[in-house]
Amino acid sequence: MALIRLWLIVFALQLALYLGLRISIRLRQVRRLEARWDSRHSGQGDTPARRAFVARGTAGFGRSLQVRLAALVFVLPTLAILGIVVLVNWQ
């Protein structure tokens, strides 16, 4: 029972960290695209063309390497805990 509680707590923490990382990475990408647009088209403000440029730039966001690496937030701590449990209980 204690192992299940540990797993649920770790999973909740991993999920919160993953969502925070994903949001942070996406916001950073949007800011970078907006800055690129502003440097090329100064003085135009927020136009439909700018929004379309940002939308095209973020279209493949879910398949990017950064998002895939952020998914390691789930894998690495789980493997570490599993390794510790095996080492502690090794006869």
Image (cartoon, grey):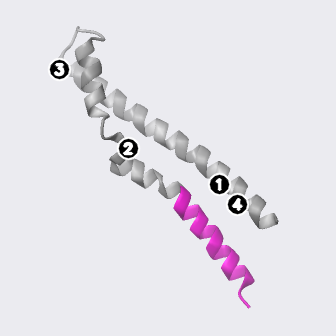
**Residue at image mark 3:** 40
Of callouts 4 and 2, the N-terminal one? 4
CB contact under 8 Å: marks 3 and 1: no
Residue 18's place in the image compared with 82, above or below, is: above
Please name which of the two marks, 3 or 2, marks the residue nearer to the observer: 2
Given contact means CB atoms under 8 Å apart, are the residues at marks 4 and 1 in contact? yes
Residue 26, position in %: x, y? 41, 35
Sequence-first disc among 1 and 2: 1
**Secondary structure found at label 4:** helix
- The magenta span reads 74-91
- Residue at the spot 60% in from the left edge and 64% down from the top edge: 78
Three-letter code for the amino acid on which mark 1 is drawn: Phe
Residue matched to label 4:
7
**Which residue has dot 2 on it?**
62
The first of marks 3 and 1 along the sequence is 1
Q: Tell me where residue 82 appears, x and y as whole percent.
A: 64, 72
List the residue tagged with mark 1.
11
